[in-house]
Each structure stands twice: as C-alpha cells, then as structure tokens.
Image: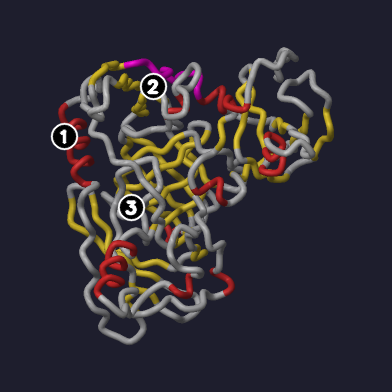
Amino acid sequence: MLVEISLAQDWTSRDVRRFSGPEASLGGVEIDTPEGYQIFDSPNLGATTIRKEAGPTTVKVIGYLPRGGQRFYLTEKANEGFWNDTQMITWILIPGSKRAEATSRDKPPRILKKETRDFFKEGPVTAEVWEETVQLAAVTEWNPTYRRSEIDFLMPVKVISFQADGESWEVRCNLFPAFDSDTGRIPGPRPEFYGEPYRALITKPAQREIVLRGTNRAEAMRSVFIANTVWAGGFSEGRLQTLRTGWTAMPPNIEVSRLSPPHFTKDAPMRFRFSATRLNDTPVVLSLTPNRIVGADFTEYGTLADLGGPYPDSESLGWAKFEHRIWNLVVRSDQSIEVVAPLTAERGAAGMLELESFDLGPSYEEDLKALLSFGKEEAPLLPAAEDNVWNDIMNTKVGPVPIRQRGPENSPF
C-alpha cells in the first residue's frame, strides 16, 4: 500500500543518494518493474503525475530520494535538472518493492565506538564505527520471476558446496561481515563533504549460511562455484542478486578470491582460464566459457582488443603484472557469467577493524581472521599451456571479441 507523503519540500540535493562507482558510469542501475512505474514532478505521492509506464519493463536510474518509506528514483536525464535550468527534475516511483518487508527484522545501524584523536597529525579528528545486522533470505531462487533492483550492500560469500540435478543447481554458502560497508546506510544527516565525523560501517549477517538455487546452465555454474572460493555477494531486498570475484580497485573493500592473469582461446566462443585463491585451501584453476566479455574504461587501453602483451620494456611489463591480476568474474541473476577486464580506479586503503561485539563463536572469529589475511594473497600463475589453443595474456593480445560474447567496454557492476 502506498503511503501519502507531505507536499512540503524539506529536502535538498544533498539528500539524494546517488549510486557510486562503476554503476553510475553506465548511466545507472537497471530495475525490473513488472507492474510498471509512475513519473512525478516532485518526490511525493500528492504531486502531479506526469505519466504512467505499463509493465513489465525496466528502468535505469542513477539514485533515489528516500521519502516516508518510499524511494523516489532519478534517471540520468532528470538528474541534469540540478544544474541545468532547462531540464525538469522528475521522479520515478516503482511499485512492487519487497525492501521494507525484507528489512523489517534487521537491527539498524548502532554506534560501536566513537573516538577523537590525531589521526592525520593535523589536529584532532572524530571517527565513528557503526554496526548493523541484516537478516537475509535463507534461500534465493534465480528463476524467470526474479525481480532485479538496486544492490543494497556487498558482503563476502564463501562457496561451501555445489550440486546439480539436470540443469537445476544449488550452491550452499557461508556469509561474512562486510567491514567496509556503505556508510550511506547510517541513519541521520550525512557529514559535510570532507567533514567530520569520519565513519566506518560493519554490515553483519544474522545467519551464517544461505542457499542459492538456479534453473539452468548447471555445468557453467559448476565451473566457477568451486568450494572455498570467496565472492562479493550483492544483496538486494534481502536476496542474493550478483556474485563477483577477483580483486578490484573500486570500493567498497570486500575481500574475495584473487585471480591470476588469464589464459584464453581465440576461437568462438572464447574460453578463459584463471588460477584462483581459496580461503584456507589451495588455489584452484577456473576454466569457463563466459556469456559476455566486457571491458573497463578505467584502463589505459581504448578497447579490449588492445589488452595483452608482449610488452616492449620493463616499465610496461611491470604495470601489466599488476593490471592483469585484477580481472574479475561476475555471475548474475539471469545465470550469465561475465569476464571483466581490469579495473584500476582509485581505491582507499583498507582499514583494520577489531572483531569485538560479534559473539559468533571461536570458529567464526578464526574464519574472520583468516579472511582478513586471505585478501593479501596472490593467485599463482597458470602453468604454461601444453597446446597451441590457449594464449597467455602476458604474451598475446585479446584481439577482437566474438560478436555473441561482446559486451559494453566499461564497467558492468
């Protein structure tokens, strides 16, 4: 049921929560709208309805304004109205969200620690550490009725086991707290830009284990969901929506399995191999055929085809050794797999947070300590290929990507 919201404008542009990172570089986040959506001239239900779009359809948005339990979304075009007087600012309301229901059992953020000290040798600075506990769906079903929405937070997810029955499959997973979660989830007014207090948020799962089920591509999923690999799980409305592994220069800092520089084939469809680290286990080789091969516009290259060696001098080779360790894999709710070219945008230093207040038992805290060390490991290089089918990225350019596997050459997550 929709709730009436006051017509008074008691918000400013600073209250709009814009999606940050690579998502914004693609013009926003796609949200499925089975029931369609409404466009208003201001962010309240008493405002003038400009038009209604029938569903099912999708809409791409770059942020939202939270109002009275609802989210009024902004498109990239409407956002221009904040600095362009000729562009009208319009707001989108999307019915069908299960977010309020999913978060009703959560424990909202509470402050764990607040201290003032001379962090940067330039005078006293106030810092706060907050913690929230989220209750997640015990089982997420990736099927044709799954409704995509914006990602609420990321959390480390370790694969326990994979099993399949025909094309249907199931992954059991362990969850870990996100120590560097989205501080925009902290209630109340946000600090001024570059102001105090400096904040950190721990997003802690209420349960240790969840299950993910899919309806097709079982063998493709088996090739990547190897026991003890660790992924950044993107959760939306309490459900698991995406899984990403491989180190990235983009925040937030979620510790995941690291990937080696890849080997690849040049036939269609292209295939890839990576060595991957595992938590408290030996590295493993992932061999897969991705649905899409996408690139990041944060690299020094213009196109994916230009990626790869050989490199003309030691300086170029040194950069390549770093760059080709930050390829990523992304598995999405449509059960597709993407290989993602390196991300090299700025990433803040990872903070070490104490493990106090968790009370989850000694075995869990041992795993947490292992996870913090795990993020510093590097995946071993793949052994040299024994045939002429596989190419080492350090020696060979990717070249043209087959049309059926080609995706946008900027970041997809």
The residue at the far front in this view is 122
| Chain-order first, disc 1 or disc 3 | 3
Residue annotated with mark 1: 366
Circle nearer the viewer, 1 or 3: 3
Q: Is residue 48 left or right of residue 5?
A: right
Tell me the quarter of the picture where residue 403 sits.
bottom right
The span from disc 3 to disc 2 (Cα, nearest Å) is 30 Å
Q: Viewer-proximal residue, 220 or 250? A: 250
In the rendered view, does 100 fall on the left or right side of 365? right
Q: Quadrant of residue 160?
A: top left
The residue pinned by badge 2 equals 196
Amino acid carrying label 1: it is: Glu
x and y percentages locating residue 137 in the rendered image: 46, 32
- Disc assigned to residue 247: 3
Task: Mark 1: give few (<14), some (14-19) or many (20+) Cα within 10 Å.
Answer: few
The residue drawn where x is 38% and y is 44% is 232
Vertical side of 352 occupied by 117: above or below: above
Marks 1 & 2, CB-CB < 8 Å contact: no
- The structure residue drawn at horizontal position 29% and vertical position 52%, both measured from the top left corner, is 257
